[in-house]
Image: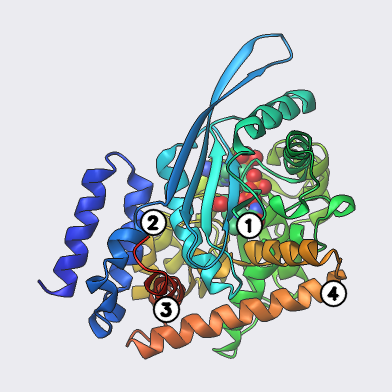
Amino acid sequence: MDTKSYVNKLIENVKIKNPGETEFHATIKEVLTSLIPLLEKEPKYIEEGVLERIVEPERQIMFRVPWVDDNGKIQVNRGFRIEFNSAIGPYKGGLRFHPTVNLSIIKFLGFEQIFKNSLTGLPIGGGKGGSDFDPKGKSDREIMRFCQSFMNELYRHIGENTDVPAGDIGVGGREIGYLFGQYKKLKNSFDSGVLTGKGIPYGGSLARTEATGYGLVYFVDEMLKDKDLSFEGKTVVVSGSGNVATYAIQKVQELGGLVVACSDSTGYVYDENGINLNTLKEIKEVQRKRISEYTKYHYTAKFVEGSQNIWTIPCDIALPCATQNEINIDAAKTLVKNGVIAVGEGANMPSTLEAIDVFLENKVLFAPAKASNAGGVAVSALEMSQNSMRLAWSFEEVDERLKNIMKNIYNNSKNAAETYGFEGNLVVGSNIAGFKKVADAMLAQGII
Ligand code: NDP
């Protein structure tokens, strides 16, 4: 059987074995298909069954999370932790609290995380977790009780050398604090390296909060520089207004770009003068309110319902930083029609496979998530290093390391793409570069 047929058959088998898991199927298809040029040159990965092993998580944990709301009513959510691959280090990946969370989404994120973590050059394996709990509208005490109940089960599966969770959508500093507190109480041990994204007073790293957004912009900046371009004077649209979006906006502004729009799940705001970051942070980080509030502070800005419409705004650079599948084929065509020159994925899988094809066919500079948003997990790994050394680096030191890591990821992905005949295609390049290191470690460690 030729390599392409072998890979297609494997993709079909994954679909049969994991019915209904559409997000997981999509990522398997994206990654495995782009590995074909490598597999043709190096058949050992097929002969040793690396692909069949890598698509199967090492361990999948699902559990009940019961908690009591402020009205004394019992609520039950479902918790997940997918320990996908530990070939190059302890499982590492965020926790997502969002009503849409299900097994498929956590598996897709966990699978992507394997390669993303490998690309950082740091010793971290791949994992992901979360719950279908919706933090919106919950009181602080409800969030605390939920996090404590979640940790009552999770604690037995994690550890600084085993599995190190972090934040993701719906899990920020507040949630990590409650999770860490409960872990410490249950274990009677201050294992600071067991969670990352911690507050600075108890083992967090400076620049972790900013890392994913900053890292994304550092990556896109490298990609632009390669074409003698820069952010200076460019019009930029950023979707989302959470952690990744906020710090992407901040860095773009520092580099001279004009961010004219951002969004949340209700719609987007357009401000031709440039999004005011202080207002955005006040609304989202302090008041935890809807993005439409922005127009109360800036009368010339407008709010448009329907977050999807943000991609109709003409821009030079698009940075999707909200959620998966937010750029479909139509949105991609609109962006191209409006002259977009670069798209950098801050969120995980924000572009559908069809949308990515549109960007590549039209020679748009395209930064795929697993490479361009790896800055967050990279600084998480730096947080683990600081914890184990019982040291704290300055903001500048961490930021400098982040910058270098993003530059290396860009160069490694670019070079891998060139080596295997896909010059300029960072989707193929990042998948091959990320896969090779993990696969070689798996080969060395035997059939386990
Ligand atoms: P946050 O919870 O901080 O923010 C998510 C943002 O996206 C919110 O503004 C949310 O709006 C918005 N959003 C959610 N769904 C939609 C939608 N359908 N349309 C428009 N906006 C939407 O999460 P993060 O910023 O941490 O994560 C964003 C993305 O980045 C995710 O894909 C995550 O996996 C990825 N990522 C995050 C990393 C990190 O370090 N935080 C690291 C690597 C990747 P609302 O408040 O209305 O829900």
How far apart are the alpha carbons under marks 2 and 3? 18 Å
Q: Which amino acid does the dot numbered 1 rest on?
A: Asn
Sequence-wise, which precedes: disc 4 or disc 3? Answer: 4
Give the side of residue 333 with respect to residue 37, left or right.
right
Give the x, y percent position of residue 8: 19, 62
Q: Is residue 410 visible?
A: yes
Mark whose residue sits in front, 1 or 4: 1
Q: Would you place residue 99 above or below residue 50 in this image? A: above
Which structural element holds mark 4? helix
Give the side of residue 156 with respect to residue 356, left or right.
right
Give the side of residue 266 with respect to residue 196, left or right.
left
Q: Which residue is mark 3?
A: 429
Sequence-wise, which precedes: disc 3 or disc 1? Answer: 1
State which quadrant residue 50 falls in.
Answer: bottom left
Q: Which mark is residue 396?
A: 4
Sequence-wise, which precedes: disc 1 or disc 2? Answer: 1
Q: Which amino acid does the dot numbered 3 rest on?
A: Gly
Q: Which amino acid does the dot numbered 2 rest on?
A: Thr
Q: Which residue is mark 1?
A: 161
How far apart are the alpha carbons under marks 4 and 3? 30 Å
